[in-house]
Image: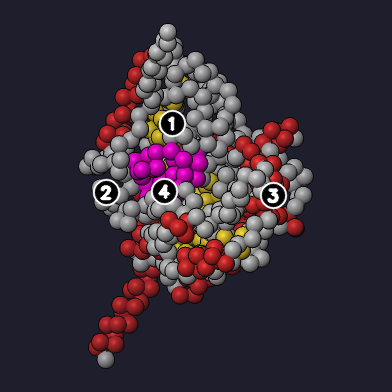
Amino acid sequence: MKQTLILLITLLLQHAANAQKPNIIVILADDLGFGDVQCNNPERGKIPTPNIDRLASQGMRFTDGHSSSGVCSPSRYTLLTGRYHWRTKLQSGIVGEFGEPLIAPDRMTIGTLAKQQGYRTACIGKWHLGWDWSITKEERSMLSPLRQPADEASKANKKAAAANAVATEKQIAAWHDIFSKPIGGGPSTRGFDLYFGTDVPNWPPFCFIENDHTLGIPSEFLSREYLINHQASKQGPALKGWKLEGILPALGDRTIKFIDESVQKKEPFLVYMPLTSPHTPLAVNPEWQGKSKLNLFADFVMETDAVVGRVLDALEKSGAADNTIVVFTADNGCAPYIGVEDLEKMGHYPSGPLRGYKFDAWEGGHRVPFMVRWPGVAKAGSVCNQLVYQADLMRTFADVFDVKLPDTAGEDSFSLVPLLKGEDKPIRENAVSAAASGIPALRSGTWKYIPAPGSGGKGKGGDQSQPVQLYNLADDLGETKNLAAAMPEKVTEMKALLEKLITDGRSTPGASQKNDVEVVRYPRAVTPKKKAKLTK
Protein backbone atom coordinates (compact mmCIF):
# COMPACT_ATOMS: atom_id res chain seq x y z
CA MET A 1 0.00 0.00 0.00
CA LYS A 2 2.82 2.37 0.96
CA GLN A 3 4.73 1.63 -2.28
CA THR A 4 1.58 2.22 -4.34
CA LEU A 5 1.05 5.58 -2.63
CA ILE A 6 4.66 6.61 -3.25
CA LEU A 7 4.34 5.64 -6.93
CA LEU A 8 1.08 7.60 -7.24
CA ILE A 9 2.63 10.70 -5.67
CA THR A 10 5.66 10.39 -7.95
CA LEU A 11 3.44 10.17 -11.02
CA LEU A 12 1.39 13.17 -9.89
CA LEU A 13 4.53 15.22 -9.31
CA GLN A 14 5.88 14.21 -12.72
CA HIS A 15 2.58 15.14 -14.36
CA ALA A 16 2.62 18.53 -12.60
CA ALA A 17 6.21 19.14 -13.69
CA ASN A 18 5.37 18.24 -17.31
CA ALA A 19 2.33 20.51 -17.25
CA GLN A 20 4.59 23.47 -16.44
CA LYS A 21 7.05 22.78 -19.25
CA PRO A 22 6.20 24.71 -22.41
CA ASN A 23 6.16 22.74 -25.64
CA ILE A 24 8.36 24.06 -28.44
CA ILE A 25 7.81 24.17 -32.20
CA VAL A 26 10.53 25.55 -34.49
CA ILE A 27 9.42 26.00 -38.10
CA LEU A 28 12.26 26.71 -40.54
CA ALA A 29 11.21 27.78 -44.03
CA ASP A 30 13.63 27.18 -46.90
CA ASP A 31 14.69 30.09 -49.18
CA LEU A 32 12.03 32.47 -47.85
CA GLY A 33 13.16 36.07 -48.17
CA PHE A 34 12.72 38.73 -45.51
CA GLY A 35 10.28 40.54 -47.80
CA ASP A 36 8.33 37.43 -48.81
CA VAL A 37 6.43 37.66 -45.53
CA GLN A 38 3.75 40.31 -45.79
CA CYS A 39 4.10 41.72 -42.27
CA ASN A 40 7.80 42.39 -42.94
CA ASN A 41 7.18 44.10 -46.26
CA PRO A 42 3.70 45.68 -46.33
CA GLU A 43 4.51 48.26 -49.01
CA ARG A 44 6.62 46.23 -51.43
CA GLY A 45 5.38 42.70 -50.70
CA LYS A 46 2.64 41.27 -52.91
CA ILE A 47 2.39 37.68 -51.62
CA PRO A 48 -0.36 37.09 -49.03
CA THR A 49 0.96 35.24 -45.95
CA PRO A 50 -2.00 35.43 -43.54
CA ASN A 51 -0.97 32.55 -41.28
CA ILE A 52 2.62 33.67 -40.77
CA ASP A 53 1.33 37.21 -40.23
CA ARG A 54 -1.15 35.87 -37.66
CA LEU A 55 1.70 34.19 -35.79
CA ALA A 56 3.64 37.47 -35.77
CA SER A 57 0.60 39.37 -34.48
CA GLN A 58 0.31 36.94 -31.58
CA GLY A 59 3.94 37.24 -30.49
CA MET A 60 7.17 39.15 -31.14
CA ARG A 61 8.52 39.90 -34.61
CA PHE A 62 12.25 40.53 -34.94
CA THR A 63 13.37 42.91 -37.69
CA ASP A 64 17.11 42.19 -37.32
CA GLY A 65 17.12 38.39 -37.12
CA HIS A 66 19.79 36.40 -38.94
CA SER A 67 20.74 32.97 -40.13
CA SER A 68 24.34 31.78 -40.03
CA SER A 69 24.73 31.73 -43.78
CA GLY A 70 23.30 32.74 -47.13
CA VAL A 71 22.79 29.06 -47.89
CA CYS A 72 21.11 26.16 -46.14
CA SER A 73 23.28 23.42 -44.51
CA PRO A 74 25.42 25.85 -42.50
CA SER A 75 22.35 27.72 -41.23
CA ARG A 76 20.77 24.44 -40.09
CA TYR A 77 23.91 23.46 -38.22
CA THR A 78 24.01 26.75 -36.34
CA LEU A 79 20.30 26.81 -35.48
CA LEU A 80 20.48 23.30 -34.02
CA THR A 81 23.77 23.66 -32.14
CA GLY A 82 24.05 27.34 -31.17
CA ARG A 83 27.52 27.36 -32.72
CA TYR A 84 28.79 29.13 -35.84
CA HIS A 85 29.04 26.71 -38.75
CA TRP A 86 32.35 28.19 -39.86
CA ARG A 87 33.97 26.61 -36.81
CA THR A 88 33.46 23.25 -38.59
CA LYS A 89 34.90 21.69 -41.73
CA LEU A 90 32.11 23.37 -43.74
CA GLN A 91 34.02 26.53 -44.56
CA SER A 92 31.92 27.15 -47.66
CA GLY A 93 29.07 25.63 -49.63
CA ILE A 94 26.68 22.96 -48.40
CA VAL A 95 26.72 19.28 -47.44
CA GLY A 96 26.97 17.37 -50.71
CA GLU A 97 24.82 14.63 -52.18
CA PHE A 98 24.99 11.57 -49.89
CA GLY A 99 27.41 13.59 -47.73
CA GLU A 100 28.75 12.73 -44.29
CA PRO A 101 27.27 14.13 -41.04
CA LEU A 102 28.27 17.70 -40.23
CA ILE A 103 27.13 17.61 -36.59
CA ALA A 104 29.62 15.67 -34.45
CA PRO A 105 28.10 12.73 -32.51
CA ASP A 106 28.89 14.33 -29.13
CA ARG A 107 27.67 17.83 -30.09
CA MET A 108 24.59 19.02 -28.17
CA THR A 109 21.60 20.09 -30.26
CA ILE A 110 18.30 21.66 -29.24
CA GLY A 111 16.91 18.14 -29.53
CA THR A 112 19.52 16.73 -27.15
CA LEU A 113 18.87 19.54 -24.70
CA ALA A 114 15.11 18.96 -24.75
CA LYS A 115 15.45 15.19 -24.37
CA GLN A 116 17.55 15.73 -21.24
CA GLN A 117 14.53 17.56 -19.79
CA GLY A 118 12.14 14.70 -20.56
CA TYR A 119 10.75 16.03 -23.84
CA ARG A 120 9.58 13.97 -26.79
CA THR A 121 11.50 15.32 -29.77
CA ALA A 122 10.93 15.16 -33.50
CA CYS A 123 12.59 16.46 -36.65
CA ILE A 124 10.10 16.52 -39.52
CA GLY A 125 11.25 17.85 -42.87
CA LYS A 126 14.50 18.59 -44.71
CA TRP A 127 17.63 17.48 -42.83
CA HIS A 128 20.52 18.27 -45.23
CA LEU A 129 23.19 17.85 -42.58
CA GLY A 130 24.60 14.55 -43.78
CA TRP A 131 24.25 10.86 -42.94
CA ASP A 132 26.54 7.86 -42.66
CA TRP A 133 25.37 6.30 -45.90
CA SER A 134 26.60 2.76 -46.45
CA ILE A 135 27.69 3.24 -50.05
CA THR A 136 30.77 1.69 -51.63
CA LYS A 137 32.76 3.47 -54.33
CA GLU A 138 31.34 1.10 -56.95
CA GLU A 139 27.78 1.59 -55.70
CA ARG A 140 28.17 5.37 -55.84
CA SER A 141 28.74 5.12 -59.59
CA MET A 142 25.39 3.33 -59.81
CA LEU A 143 23.41 6.31 -58.46
CA SER A 144 23.41 8.35 -61.68
CA PRO A 145 22.38 7.50 -65.25
CA LEU A 146 25.14 5.63 -67.03
CA ARG A 147 27.18 7.91 -69.24
CA GLN A 148 26.80 7.42 -72.94
CA PRO A 149 29.74 7.45 -75.33
CA ALA A 150 30.26 10.79 -77.06
CA ASP A 151 29.18 9.39 -80.44
CA GLU A 152 25.82 8.30 -79.01
CA ALA A 153 24.71 11.50 -77.33
CA SER A 154 25.70 15.04 -78.21
CA LYS A 155 25.90 17.73 -75.56
CA ALA A 156 22.60 19.13 -76.79
CA ASN A 157 20.62 15.98 -76.02
CA LYS A 158 22.48 14.64 -72.99
CA LYS A 159 19.92 16.14 -70.62
CA ALA A 160 17.10 14.57 -72.58
CA ALA A 161 18.94 11.25 -72.52
CA ALA A 162 19.29 11.52 -68.75
CA ALA A 163 15.62 12.37 -68.40
CA ASN A 164 14.72 9.21 -70.28
CA ALA A 165 17.21 7.13 -68.28
CA VAL A 166 16.16 3.60 -67.44
CA ALA A 167 17.81 1.92 -64.46
CA THR A 168 19.73 -1.24 -65.33
CA GLU A 169 19.35 -4.47 -63.39
CA LYS A 170 22.79 -3.87 -61.90
CA GLN A 171 21.77 -0.39 -60.72
CA ILE A 172 18.52 -1.63 -59.19
CA ALA A 173 20.43 -4.37 -57.37
CA ALA A 174 22.90 -1.78 -56.02
CA TRP A 175 20.03 0.46 -54.87
CA HIS A 176 18.40 -2.46 -53.07
CA ASP A 177 21.66 -3.10 -51.23
CA ILE A 178 22.10 0.59 -50.30
CA PHE A 179 18.55 1.48 -49.30
CA SER A 180 17.68 -1.70 -47.42
CA LYS A 181 20.35 -0.95 -44.79
CA PRO A 182 19.92 1.33 -41.75
CA ILE A 183 21.31 4.84 -42.31
CA GLY A 184 23.50 6.08 -39.47
CA GLY A 185 24.39 9.58 -38.37
CA GLY A 186 20.99 11.16 -39.01
CA PRO A 187 18.55 13.12 -36.82
CA SER A 188 17.71 10.12 -34.61
CA THR A 189 21.37 10.10 -33.52
CA ARG A 190 21.48 13.86 -32.99
CA GLY A 191 18.79 14.39 -30.37
CA PHE A 192 15.51 13.51 -32.07
CA ASP A 193 13.27 10.59 -31.10
CA LEU A 194 11.58 10.71 -34.49
CA TYR A 195 12.62 11.75 -37.95
CA PHE A 196 10.40 11.89 -41.01
CA GLY A 197 11.17 13.75 -44.19
CA THR A 198 13.19 13.94 -47.37
CA ASP A 199 16.87 14.63 -46.82
CA VAL A 200 17.03 17.10 -49.74
CA PRO A 201 13.82 17.17 -51.82
CA ASN A 202 15.45 18.10 -55.12
CA TRP A 203 18.22 15.48 -54.72
CA PRO A 204 18.11 11.70 -54.56
CA PRO A 205 17.02 9.48 -53.01
CA PHE A 206 13.54 10.54 -54.05
CA CYS A 207 11.61 8.94 -51.21
CA PHE A 208 10.72 9.60 -47.58
CA ILE A 209 13.09 8.63 -44.79
CA GLU A 210 11.75 7.62 -41.40
CA ASN A 211 14.24 7.50 -38.53
CA ASP A 212 17.12 5.47 -40.02
CA HIS A 213 15.59 3.86 -43.11
CA THR A 214 13.96 4.78 -46.39
CA LEU A 215 10.24 4.12 -46.73
CA GLY A 216 10.45 1.78 -49.68
CA ILE A 217 13.33 0.94 -52.00
CA PRO A 218 13.91 3.22 -55.01
CA SER A 219 13.61 1.26 -58.24
CA GLU A 220 13.66 3.80 -61.08
CA PHE A 221 15.09 7.17 -62.07
CA LEU A 222 12.91 10.17 -61.32
CA SER A 223 10.35 10.94 -64.02
CA ARG A 224 11.53 13.39 -66.71
CA GLU A 225 8.66 15.79 -65.88
CA TYR A 226 10.49 16.74 -62.68
CA LEU A 227 13.76 17.80 -64.31
CA ILE A 228 12.51 21.13 -65.69
CA ASN A 229 11.07 24.43 -64.44
CA HIS A 230 12.83 24.59 -61.06
CA GLN A 231 11.86 21.09 -59.96
CA ALA A 232 14.45 18.42 -59.16
CA SER A 233 18.03 19.46 -59.86
CA LYS A 234 19.68 16.03 -59.97
CA GLN A 235 18.85 12.70 -61.54
CA GLY A 236 18.86 9.74 -59.21
CA PRO A 237 17.08 6.79 -57.58
CA ALA A 238 13.36 7.29 -56.92
CA LEU A 239 10.41 5.30 -55.67
CA LYS A 240 8.16 4.17 -58.50
CA GLY A 241 5.71 6.99 -59.26
CA TRP A 242 7.31 9.43 -56.79
CA LYS A 243 5.50 12.78 -56.76
CA LEU A 244 7.28 15.90 -55.50
CA GLU A 245 3.95 17.62 -54.85
CA GLY A 246 3.19 15.24 -52.01
CA ILE A 247 6.18 16.20 -49.87
CA LEU A 248 5.00 19.44 -48.24
CA PRO A 249 1.49 18.21 -47.30
CA ALA A 250 3.02 15.04 -45.81
CA LEU A 251 5.28 17.09 -43.55
CA GLY A 252 2.24 18.96 -42.27
CA ASP A 253 0.38 15.70 -41.66
CA ARG A 254 3.22 14.12 -39.70
CA THR A 255 3.83 17.21 -37.60
CA ILE A 256 0.17 17.39 -36.64
CA LYS A 257 0.18 13.67 -35.82
CA PHE A 258 3.21 14.08 -33.56
CA ILE A 259 1.64 17.03 -31.73
CA ASP A 260 -1.62 15.15 -31.17
CA GLU A 261 0.18 12.05 -29.90
CA SER A 262 2.33 14.08 -27.51
CA VAL A 263 -0.67 15.92 -26.10
CA GLN A 264 -2.56 12.65 -25.61
CA LYS A 265 0.45 11.16 -23.80
CA LYS A 266 0.69 14.31 -21.67
CA GLU A 267 4.38 14.60 -22.53
CA PRO A 268 6.11 17.92 -23.30
CA PHE A 269 7.41 18.00 -26.85
CA LEU A 270 9.84 19.79 -29.13
CA VAL A 271 9.26 19.71 -32.88
CA TYR A 272 11.90 20.99 -35.29
CA MET A 273 10.08 21.36 -38.63
CA PRO A 274 12.53 22.30 -41.41
CA LEU A 275 10.19 22.80 -44.35
CA THR A 276 11.24 21.88 -47.88
CA SER A 277 9.61 25.03 -49.22
CA PRO A 278 9.54 27.47 -50.87
CA HIS A 279 12.91 26.10 -52.04
CA THR A 280 12.97 24.15 -55.27
CA PRO A 281 11.41 21.84 -56.29
CA LEU A 282 8.62 24.34 -56.87
CA ALA A 283 6.17 21.45 -56.68
CA VAL A 284 3.00 23.48 -56.21
CA ASN A 285 -0.20 21.52 -55.76
CA PRO A 286 -3.03 22.26 -58.22
CA GLU A 287 -5.19 24.16 -55.73
CA TRP A 288 -2.38 26.70 -55.25
CA GLN A 289 -1.19 27.11 -58.82
CA GLY A 290 -1.86 30.66 -60.03
CA LYS A 291 -3.14 31.81 -56.62
CA SER A 292 -0.56 34.57 -56.24
CA LYS A 293 -1.05 35.92 -59.77
CA LEU A 294 2.73 36.42 -59.77
CA ASN A 295 4.75 33.26 -60.48
CA LEU A 296 5.21 29.66 -59.32
CA PHE A 297 7.53 30.63 -56.46
CA ALA A 298 4.96 33.07 -55.11
CA ASP A 299 2.30 30.35 -55.35
CA PHE A 300 4.59 28.07 -53.34
CA VAL A 301 5.05 30.72 -50.67
CA MET A 302 1.28 30.81 -50.30
CA GLU A 303 1.11 27.01 -50.05
CA THR A 304 3.89 27.11 -47.46
CA ASP A 305 1.95 29.67 -45.45
CA ALA A 306 -1.09 27.39 -45.57
CA VAL A 307 0.90 24.47 -44.10
CA VAL A 308 2.07 26.75 -41.28
CA GLY A 309 -1.58 27.61 -40.73
CA ARG A 310 -2.55 23.93 -40.59
CA VAL A 311 0.02 23.29 -37.86
CA LEU A 312 -1.05 26.33 -35.85
CA ASP A 313 -4.72 25.36 -36.15
CA ALA A 314 -3.99 21.78 -35.07
CA LEU A 315 -2.02 23.06 -32.10
CA GLU A 316 -4.97 25.23 -31.09
CA LYS A 317 -7.39 22.34 -31.52
CA SER A 318 -5.19 20.09 -29.34
CA GLY A 319 -5.53 22.53 -26.44
CA ALA A 320 -1.75 22.95 -26.15
CA ALA A 321 -1.34 26.33 -27.88
CA ASP A 322 -1.31 28.40 -24.69
CA ASN A 323 1.61 26.34 -23.37
CA THR A 324 3.66 26.19 -26.58
CA ILE A 325 6.50 28.39 -27.81
CA VAL A 326 6.36 28.70 -31.61
CA VAL A 327 9.36 29.99 -33.55
CA PHE A 328 9.16 30.76 -37.26
CA THR A 329 12.19 31.69 -39.33
CA ALA A 330 14.02 30.82 -42.58
CA ASP A 331 17.43 29.38 -43.43
CA ASN A 332 18.46 32.18 -45.83
CA GLY A 333 17.09 34.71 -48.28
CA CYS A 334 15.08 34.15 -51.44
CA ALA A 335 16.93 32.41 -54.28
CA PRO A 336 17.66 34.82 -57.15
CA TYR A 337 17.05 32.18 -59.81
CA ILE A 338 13.31 31.68 -59.19
CA GLY A 339 12.26 34.74 -61.18
CA VAL A 340 13.26 37.55 -58.84
CA GLU A 341 13.66 40.12 -61.62
CA ASP A 342 10.15 39.39 -62.89
CA LEU A 343 8.73 39.56 -59.36
CA GLU A 344 10.31 42.95 -58.80
CA LYS A 345 8.84 44.22 -62.07
CA MET A 346 5.43 43.14 -60.74
CA GLY A 347 6.02 45.05 -57.50
CA HIS A 348 7.12 42.23 -55.19
CA TYR A 349 10.58 42.57 -53.61
CA PRO A 350 11.58 39.30 -51.87
CA SER A 351 14.33 41.01 -49.87
CA GLY A 352 12.23 44.05 -49.02
CA PRO A 353 14.57 47.01 -48.40
CA LEU A 354 17.66 44.79 -48.22
CA ARG A 355 20.44 44.32 -50.73
CA GLY A 356 21.17 40.86 -52.11
CA TYR A 357 19.57 37.44 -52.05
CA LYS A 358 20.35 33.85 -51.14
CA PHE A 359 24.11 33.08 -51.22
CA ASP A 360 25.11 36.68 -50.35
CA ALA A 361 27.01 38.28 -47.49
CA TRP A 362 24.78 41.30 -48.02
CA GLU A 363 21.74 41.52 -45.74
CA GLY A 364 19.33 39.91 -48.20
CA GLY A 365 21.30 36.70 -47.93
CA HIS A 366 20.89 36.11 -44.20
CA ARG A 367 18.54 38.68 -42.60
CA VAL A 368 15.42 36.54 -42.53
CA PRO A 369 11.86 36.35 -41.19
CA PHE A 370 12.11 35.70 -37.44
CA MET A 371 9.22 35.63 -34.97
CA VAL A 372 8.39 33.98 -31.65
CA ARG A 373 5.00 33.38 -30.07
CA TRP A 374 5.13 32.59 -26.35
CA PRO A 375 1.70 33.13 -24.76
CA GLY A 376 1.84 34.97 -21.46
CA VAL A 377 5.46 36.03 -21.98
CA ALA A 378 6.00 37.68 -25.38
CA LYS A 379 3.58 40.55 -25.85
CA ALA A 380 1.20 40.05 -28.76
CA GLY A 381 1.97 42.29 -31.71
CA SER A 382 5.34 43.41 -30.35
CA VAL A 383 8.28 44.26 -32.60
CA CYS A 384 11.94 44.01 -31.58
CA ASN A 385 14.72 45.76 -33.51
CA GLN A 386 17.63 44.27 -31.56
CA LEU A 387 20.21 42.05 -33.29
CA VAL A 388 19.29 38.37 -32.87
CA TYR A 389 20.50 35.17 -34.41
CA GLN A 390 19.18 31.66 -34.98
CA ALA A 391 22.03 30.34 -32.84
CA ASP A 392 20.28 32.04 -29.92
CA LEU A 393 17.58 29.38 -29.77
CA MET A 394 19.89 26.97 -27.90
CA ARG A 395 20.51 29.24 -24.91
CA THR A 396 16.94 30.55 -25.05
CA PHE A 397 15.60 27.04 -24.58
CA ALA A 398 18.18 26.37 -21.84
CA ASP A 399 16.82 29.42 -20.01
CA VAL A 400 13.26 28.19 -20.52
CA PHE A 401 14.31 24.85 -18.98
CA ASP A 402 16.27 26.68 -16.25
CA VAL A 403 19.46 24.74 -16.99
CA LYS A 404 23.01 25.89 -17.59
CA LEU A 405 24.77 24.90 -20.80
CA PRO A 406 28.22 23.32 -20.55
CA ASP A 407 31.12 25.30 -22.02
CA THR A 408 31.19 22.88 -24.96
CA ALA A 409 27.64 23.72 -26.10
CA GLY A 410 26.01 26.82 -27.55
CA GLU A 411 29.30 28.69 -27.83
CA ASP A 412 27.68 31.39 -29.97
CA SER A 413 24.20 31.41 -28.44
CA PHE A 414 22.66 34.24 -26.41
CA SER A 415 19.27 34.00 -24.73
CA LEU A 416 16.28 35.74 -26.31
CA VAL A 417 14.31 35.51 -23.05
CA PRO A 418 15.03 39.09 -21.86
CA LEU A 419 13.81 40.46 -25.20
CA LEU A 420 10.75 38.21 -25.20
CA LYS A 421 9.90 39.53 -21.74
CA GLY A 422 9.95 43.08 -23.02
CA GLU A 423 13.46 44.39 -22.36
CA ASP A 424 14.87 46.53 -25.16
CA LYS A 425 18.60 46.11 -24.60
CA PRO A 426 21.09 44.23 -26.81
CA ILE A 427 21.56 40.57 -25.89
CA ARG A 428 24.56 40.28 -28.21
CA GLU A 429 27.03 42.92 -29.34
CA ASN A 430 28.14 41.11 -32.49
CA ALA A 431 27.30 38.32 -34.91
CA VAL A 432 28.91 36.64 -37.91
CA SER A 433 27.01 35.35 -40.93
CA ALA A 434 28.67 34.14 -44.11
CA ALA A 435 28.11 34.04 -47.84
CA ALA A 436 27.82 30.68 -49.57
CA SER A 437 31.44 31.13 -50.65
CA GLY A 438 32.50 31.40 -47.00
CA ILE A 439 33.15 35.15 -46.97
CA PRO A 440 32.09 36.41 -43.51
CA ALA A 441 29.88 39.37 -42.70
CA LEU A 442 30.60 40.69 -39.21
CA ARG A 443 28.10 42.79 -37.30
CA SER A 444 29.17 44.93 -34.35
CA GLY A 445 26.24 47.01 -33.23
CA THR A 446 24.99 48.74 -36.36
CA TRP A 447 28.35 48.41 -38.13
CA LYS A 448 28.92 45.72 -40.73
CA TYR A 449 32.23 44.53 -42.13
CA ILE A 450 32.74 42.26 -45.16
CA PRO A 451 36.42 41.47 -45.80
CA ALA A 452 36.01 41.06 -49.56
CA PRO A 453 34.56 42.92 -52.55
CA GLY A 454 31.12 42.09 -53.93
CA SER A 455 28.40 39.91 -52.47
CA GLY A 456 30.39 36.76 -51.77
CA GLY A 457 27.58 34.88 -53.44
CA LYS A 458 25.88 35.26 -56.78
CA GLY A 459 24.74 38.84 -56.36
CA LYS A 460 25.42 41.43 -59.02
CA GLY A 461 27.22 44.71 -58.47
CA GLY A 462 29.59 45.87 -55.79
CA ASP A 463 32.70 47.95 -56.21
CA GLN A 464 35.34 45.37 -57.05
CA SER A 465 38.08 47.98 -56.61
CA GLN A 466 37.49 48.04 -52.84
CA PRO A 467 39.07 44.98 -51.14
CA VAL A 468 36.75 45.25 -48.11
CA GLN A 469 33.35 46.74 -47.27
CA LEU A 470 32.16 48.72 -44.27
CA TYR A 471 28.59 49.89 -43.76
CA ASN A 472 26.64 51.61 -41.03
CA LEU A 473 23.25 49.92 -41.21
CA ALA A 474 21.71 52.54 -38.89
CA ASP A 475 21.44 54.93 -41.83
CA ASP A 476 22.31 52.67 -44.78
CA LEU A 477 20.25 49.48 -44.51
CA GLY A 478 20.56 48.96 -48.25
CA GLU A 479 24.39 48.83 -48.02
CA THR A 480 24.92 51.47 -50.69
CA LYS A 481 27.75 53.49 -49.08
CA ASN A 482 31.00 51.63 -48.55
CA LEU A 483 32.83 53.58 -45.82
CA ALA A 484 35.94 51.38 -45.73
CA ALA A 485 38.24 53.79 -47.53
CA ALA A 486 37.05 56.74 -45.45
CA MET A 487 37.27 54.91 -42.09
CA PRO A 488 40.40 52.71 -42.06
CA GLU A 489 40.55 52.74 -38.23
CA LYS A 490 37.06 51.23 -38.02
CA VAL A 491 38.05 48.59 -40.56
CA THR A 492 41.07 47.69 -38.43
CA GLU A 493 38.86 47.47 -35.35
CA MET A 494 36.36 45.18 -37.07
CA LYS A 495 39.10 42.98 -38.49
CA ALA A 496 40.58 42.54 -34.99
CA LEU A 497 37.15 41.67 -33.56
CA LEU A 498 36.58 39.02 -36.22
CA GLU A 499 39.98 37.49 -35.48
CA LYS A 500 39.19 37.37 -31.76
CA LEU A 501 35.85 35.66 -32.37
CA ILE A 502 37.66 33.07 -34.46
CA THR A 503 40.56 32.38 -32.11
CA ASP A 504 38.46 32.29 -28.92
CA GLY A 505 36.33 29.49 -30.34
CA ARG A 506 33.24 31.20 -28.95
CA SER A 507 31.49 34.56 -28.78
CA THR A 508 29.73 33.98 -25.44
CA PRO A 509 31.34 34.18 -21.98
CA GLY A 510 33.08 30.96 -20.96
CA ALA A 511 36.19 28.89 -21.45
CA SER A 512 37.84 29.19 -24.85
CA GLN A 513 37.08 26.34 -27.22
CA LYS A 514 38.83 24.85 -30.22
CA ASN A 515 37.43 25.19 -33.70
CA ASP A 516 37.15 21.90 -35.57
CA VAL A 517 39.52 23.08 -38.30
CA GLU A 518 41.74 26.03 -39.14
CA VAL A 519 39.21 28.72 -40.05
CA VAL A 520 39.81 30.41 -43.40
CA ARG A 521 40.73 34.08 -43.04
CA TYR A 522 39.64 36.95 -45.26
CA PRO A 523 40.68 38.92 -47.23
CA ARG A 524 42.37 35.91 -48.84
CA ALA A 525 46.05 36.30 -49.53
CA VAL A 526 46.70 36.69 -53.25
CA THR A 527 49.44 34.44 -54.57
CA PRO A 528 51.57 36.43 -57.01
CA LYS A 529 51.57 35.00 -60.51
CA LYS A 530 54.84 33.59 -61.74
CA LYS A 531 56.40 35.50 -64.60
CA ALA A 532 56.47 33.54 -67.79
CA LYS A 533 59.91 32.59 -68.98
CA LEU A 534 61.01 34.32 -72.13
CA THR A 535 61.94 32.00 -74.95
CA LYS A 536 64.57 32.83 -77.47
Element at label 3:
helix
**Residue drawn 39% across and 50% down?**
102
**Residue drawn 59% across and 63% down?**
168
Q: Are marks 2 and 3 in contact (CB under 8 Å)?
A: no
Task: Give how far across and how far down residue 48 sits, in percent.
Answer: 69, 46
Task: Give how far across and how far down residue 158 sits, in percent.
Answer: 66, 46
* Tag 4: amino acid: Tyr
The residues tagged by marks 2 and 1 sit, at their Cα atoms, a distance apart of: 25 Å
Task: Give how far across and how far down residue 74 sits, in percent.
Answer: 44, 44
Q: Name the residue beneath numbered marker 2.
A: 408
Element at label 2:
loop
* Tag 1: amino acid: Ile
Element at label 1:
loop
* Tag 3: amino acid: Ala
Q: Please report whichever mark, 4 or 1, sits nearer to the chain's N-terminal start.
A: 4
**Residue drawn 40% across and 53% down?**
100
Q: Is residue 93 magenta?
A: yes
